[in-house]
Image: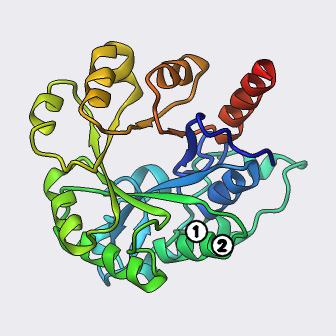
Amino acid sequence: MSTRAPDRPLVLAHRGASDEYAEHTLAAYLAALEAGADGLECDVRLTADGHLVCVHDRNLRRTASTRGLVSTMDLADLDQLDFSSWKHPWAELDDERPDQVEEHGRVLTLRKLFEVVADLDRRVEIAVETKHPTRYGGLVERRVAELLRDFGWDRPGGPVRVMSFSYTALQRMERLAPDVQLVQLIEHIPYWPVLRRVVGRDWLLGPGVKLLHESRRLGESITRAGHDMHVWTVNTPDDLRVCQELGVRAVITDRPAYLLDLLEQQAGADG
């Protein structure tokens, strides 16, 4: 694997290599790591018995074909569900499909994802998004902070940054783990003039790439305010170009192998 040029953005796998594999499954994250992703991104929710799991939606209709809510189910119950078949519903009819490891398609806990990264022989960043609103409120951030302490990743220079669209949630996280990097996500352009007055000086900003396409001034304003950017979800050459022109620090993508290949081609052409 080639060494990352200092001026190229970090490539973080959005819910794993989720263009090819079912999002938030171990299979998706292992594929992203195999591709050489610089980091992994995940969404977290709390189960009824207090476990942090990597699931985006509050309900399980889309990814596990059940009407249940993550917040009302115990981890043991979630572990009985199939979180991968929705992505490739006809896979069992493919005789050339490689055998699947059952654990790789089950619900993934944040602890397990941390364990996988901790066992690697290279540094891999992890961007953890806490989802709000939730019935458990601030307990989500408290559980994340506890887990970070378990791994010793609550100290300066740790590989984990915590993201949220909720400014209140990030304030809470700052109190619980003051040395952990925070990322204020932005979904709408008009939110920035308000946020720029209140976000922490050292916080990163996370606009969606569509906002940067709509308004280059947004990206320039964030940079002038002294904030690095983590941009989502960057999947095309045009998305990548916009981010590079604005000096974005990290891009979050469903297609980590593809983006890394684009960046390698650029490096070869420049060399």
In percent of the image, x 47 and y 34: which residue is there? Answer: 233
The residue carrying mark 2 is: 103
Q: Residues within 10 Å of mark 2 (few under 14, many from 20)?
A: few
Q: Which residue is mark 1?
A: 106
Left or right: residue 33 versus residue 15 is right
The numbered dot on residue 82 is: none
Q: Residue at x 50, y 64 (%)?
A: 159
Q: Secondary structure at mark 1?
A: loop
Q: Position of residue 177 (x, y in %)?
A: 28, 72
Say which element carries label 2.
Answer: helix
Position in image of residue 79 (x %, y %): 51, 76
Q: Position of residue 191 (x, y in %)?
A: 15, 31
Where does the image place residue 113, in percent across and percent down from the top left? Answer: 55, 70
83 vs 43, left or right, is right
Q: Residues within 10 Å of mark 1 (few under 14, many from 20)?
A: many
Name the residue type under label 2: Glu
C-alpha gap between disc 2 and disc 1? 5 Å
Q: Is residue 151 left or right of residue 188?
A: right
Residue at 17% across, 66% down: 172
* Residue 189 or residue 248, whichever sits in front: 248
Name the image quarter holding residue 50. bottom left
In the foreground, 114 or 107:
114
Say whether marks 2 and 1 touch (CB < 8 Å).
yes
Is residue 219 placed above or below 113 in the rendered structure?
above
